[in-house]
Image: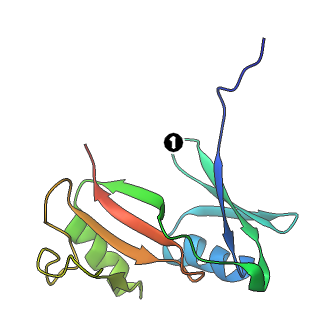
Amino acid sequence: MVDLGTSFSGFSVDDVDAARTFYGDVLGLDTVVENGILRIRFADGHHVIAYPKGPAHVPATFTILNFSVDDVAATVAELRARGVPFERYAGTPAETDEDFVFRGGGPLIAWFTDPAGNICSIIAAD
């Protein structure tokens, strides 16, 4: 019988070394580069990969990773202190406060991009 119970996702980057530095050193995630592909491991045992596309890379126009946290504003403040710039998107500035947290409905959320321009978020845990 086919077992498709184990899966992972991936996204492209233009520079694997820059991605490893960002996800590993800046965000503090467990990372390893194997055969030119970055593997990002999470505490719950899951992982994603970032694969090189070089100059052919186009940043994702959607959120590639959502980091679920208990305190969005505190997490944003800590990551900003580490040099992570957060985003305010067109159409949301009135609801995005001075802490870069979107409070316009739904869960609290804040967005940032990785060095390759891919969108990530900090989102309130359920």
In the rendered image of this protein, does residue 50 appear above or below residue 125? below
Q: Quadrant of residue 34?
A: bottom right
Within 10 Å of disc 1 (Cα), the crowding (few <14, some 14-19, many 20+) is: few
Which quadrant: the N terminus? top right
In the rendered image of this protein, does residue 119 appear above or below residue 15? above
Q: Is residue 125 left or right of residue 47?
A: left
Viewer-side residue, 100 vs 77: 100
Q: Is residue 92 left or right of residue 30?
A: left
Q: Is residue 30 left or right of residue 4?
A: left
In the rendered image of this protein, does residue 102 appear above or below residue 86? above
In the rendered image of this protein, does residue 98 appear above or below residue 33? below
Q: Quadrant of residue 32?
A: bottom right
Q: How many marks?
A: 1
Q: Residue at x 20, y 69 (%)?
A: 102
* Direction right: furthest residue: 35
**Residue 52, percent from left and from top:** 77, 72
Q: Residue at x 68, y 69 (%)?
A: 12
Q: Residue at x 62, y 49 (%)?
A: 47
Q: Secondary structure at mark 1?
A: loop
Residue type at tag 1? Asp
Which quadrant: the C terminus? top left
Q: Which residue is tagged 1?
A: 44
